[in-house]
Image (cartoon, rainbow, N blue to C red):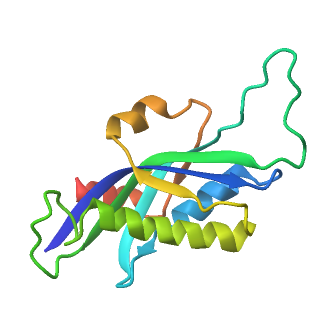
Amino acid sequence: MPDSLIVPLFVTTDLPPHADLAEFGELLARTARVLGPDGYEASLSGKVFWLDRPVLPGQRPAADDELRFAGLLGHLATTVPTTVPTTVPTSGSGRGVREVVRDVRRAIGAAVTERYGDVGAAPAVFAIRDRDVRERTPDSALDVATPRAAELVGAAR
C-alpha cells in the first residue's frame, strides 16, 4: 500500500536578469518528478513570482545586469511504497519531511545550476506551514505543476 506525504514548500534563488519566470517554474515542476537515490515519484504544484526589491521614490531601479530573486510557494506530494516501518511522526513514504525536503533541495539545486549556471548561491528550499503558502502567495504569481500533480495530491490527501 502506498504511503503519502504533502510538504508545503518555499523555494528561493537568484536568477540571471533576463530569466523567464514561467520557464523557471516549469523547471522546478519537472525536477520534482523523481527524487532521492531510490527514485521515488513526487509532484510539485504551486506558484512562482519575482521577489524584486521595491523601488521607492528617489531610488534607482535595479541595473539591467543585476540578478533577480525568484520564489515558489507550493506543495510537494509524494506517493511511494513504504518499504520499512517508520516511527517518523508524519505520514509518508517511509521517510519524513526532512528527507523529502533534502531530496527536493538536491534535485532543484542541480537543475538550477545546470540551467542557469553558478549564480553565486544554491537555491534555498525549505518546508513551511501550509497557512504560509495560502497567505503569502502573491496574486500575480504564475501557476506551475508537475504533470499528474492533481492525481498525486489527491492520492496523498
Can you tell which quarter of the image residue 16 is in?
bottom right
Can you tell which quarter of the image residue 54 is in?
top right
Q: Residue furthest top?
A: 57
Q: Is residue 6 above or below residue 62?
A: below
Instruction: State the image coordinates of residue 12 (x, y, percent, origin top left).
Output: 57, 50
Instruction: State the image coordinates of residue 58 (x, y, percent, origin top left).
Output: 87, 16
Q: Is residue 55 above or below residue 41?
A: above
Which residue lies at the image location 44% right of the left edge and 47% below the top edge?
Answer: 74
Q: Residue furthest bottom?
A: 38
Q: Is residue 45 left or right of residue 59?
A: left
Q: Is residue 52 left or right of residue 47?
A: right
Q: Is residue 46 left or right of residue 98?
A: right
Instruction: State the image coordinates of residue 35 (x, y, percent, origin top left).
Output: 41, 74
Which residue lies at the image location 16% right of the left edge and 82% below the top edge?
Answer: 83
Instruction: State the image coordinates of residue 48 (x, y, percent, origin top left).
Output: 59, 46
Q: Residue furthest front?
A: 120
Point out the image quarter for the N terminus.
bottom left
Q: Is residue 122 above or below residue 75?
A: below
Q: Which one is nearer the viewer's eye here, 51 or 145?
A: 51
